Image (cartoon, grey):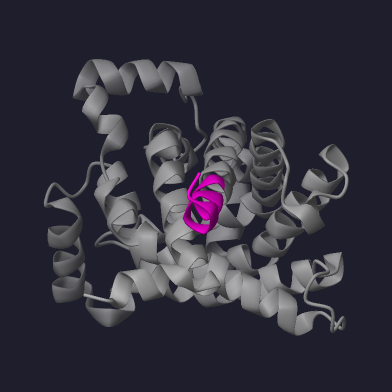
């Protein structure tokens, strides 16, 4: 009975809950654009990519053929896990950024170098949890599995084993470790530039949170996007394996569809990143203030 009051009375407890709130806000606000991104990244039925639809045409065709609910297919997987995942990510980042910082003054914010290193460590660690969730989400978004998140996960474990559920782990780590370094560094740098002194006072406006969070999301996606294309293709494979690992997927994709394939769907991803990460950081900061001050 006394757990929640004591839990929320601690700073790490409030950060954990606020991180979960931010994660849920991000999933709900950005999943339709994420579905478009995943479908745009997939190889065409025949090589060459002739007649590939634009994001707008693809959106219209999905809604017409499958209904608006198709844009939210697969959302249950990340939404079910995102509270814990995002809460842990913010908590681990707070610990690592402080650990890498040479300053002994707890009132001073971590240096930008410590922020970047903390982000890299956070991205690498959270990949262990994120990789299976994204695998299930991608399978559902592509319409290949109609069993729901839990049923799809069970199906993968049964037919492909533990190796199957963790397919794409290496490329997920390669994507998320550097991108999270860029992510947190960009957020802290942007919020300080938009509202000088706010890193120490924590008194930035909602507009600052939205813009700084949005810019952080855009920067992190641009720096890792080719790796995300490779990851999506590897994790989308069911039955016949078209690609034999990361290097083979990269080489064959470029050879068959051109270098531009590595940036296919970037516009949709960037638009989603700005919306989602603005929502994540805003919800996180506002929830943290509410839990700490009650207003």
- The percent coordinates of residue 279 (x first, y second) are 53, 39
- The percent coordinates of residue 227 (x first, y second) are 60, 57
Which stretch appears magenta? 286-295
283 left or right, relative to 63: right
Main SS of the magenta part reads: helix
> Vertically, is 88 above or below 206?
below
The answer to which of 3 and 99 lies nearer the viewer is 3
> Vertically, is 280 above or below 12?
above
Which quarter of the figure is the N terminus placed in? bottom left
Asked if residue 294 is among those painted magenta in the image, a careful observer would answer yes
Count of marks placed on residues: 0
- The percent coordinates of residue 126 (x first, y second) are 50, 71
295 left or right, relative to 135: right
Determine if residue 37 is in view. Answer: yes
> Vertically, is 122 above or below 30?
below
The answer to which of 22 and 132 lies nearer the viewer is 22
- The percent coordinates of residue 271 (x first, y second) are 59, 31
Residue shown at 78%/45% (left/top)?
Answer: 191
Asked if residue 97 is among those painted magenta in the image, a careful observer would answer no
Q: Quadrant of residue 214?
A: top right
The answer to which of 113 and 21 lies nearer the viewer is 21
Residue shown at 23%/41% (left/top)?
Answer: 143
Residue shown at 80%/45% (left/top)?
Answer: 190
Residue shown at 21%/22% (left/top)?
Answer: 67
8 left or right, relative to 96: left
Determine if residue 173 is in view. Answer: no
Q: Quadrant of residue 150?
A: bottom left
> Vertically, is 150 above or below 265?
below
211 left or right, relative to 200: left
């Amino acid at each position: 009975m006394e757990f929640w009051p004591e839990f929320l009375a601690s700073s790490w407890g409030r950060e954990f809950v606020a991180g979960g709130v931010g994660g849920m806000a991000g999933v709900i606000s950005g999943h339709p654009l994420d579905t478009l991104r995943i479908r745009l990244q997939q190889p065409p039925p025949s090589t060459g990519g002739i007649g590939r639809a634009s994001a707008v045409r693809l959106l219209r065709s999905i809604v017409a053929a499958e209904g608006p609910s198709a844009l939210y297919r697969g959302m249950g997987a990340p939404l079910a896990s995102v509270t814990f995942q995002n809460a842990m990510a913010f908590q681990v980042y707070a610990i690592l950024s402080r650990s890498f910082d040479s300053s002994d003054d707890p009132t001073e914010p971590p240096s930008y170098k410590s922020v970047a290193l903390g982000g890299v460590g956070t991205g690498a660690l959270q990949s262990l949890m994120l990789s299976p969730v994204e695998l299930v989400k991608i399978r559902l978004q592509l319409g290949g599995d109609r069993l729901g998140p839990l049923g799809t996960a069970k199906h993968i474990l049964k037919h492909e084993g533990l190796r199957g559920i963790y397919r794409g782990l290496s490329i997920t780590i390669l994507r998320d470790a550097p991108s999270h370094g860029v992510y947190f560094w960009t957020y802290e740098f942007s919020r300080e530039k938009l509202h000088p002194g706010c890193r120490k006072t924590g008194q930035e406006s909602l507009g600052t949170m939205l813009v700084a969070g949005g810019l952080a999301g855009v920067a992190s996606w641009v720096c890792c996007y080719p790796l995300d294309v490779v990851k999506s293709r590897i994790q989308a494979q069911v039955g016949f394996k078209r690609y034999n690992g990361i290097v083979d997927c990269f080489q064959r994709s470029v050879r068959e569809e051109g270098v531009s394939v590595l940036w296919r769907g970037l516009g949709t991803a960037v638009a989603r990143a700005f919306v989602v990460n603005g929502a994540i950081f805003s919800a996180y900061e506002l929830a943290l203030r509410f839990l700490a001050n009650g207003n």
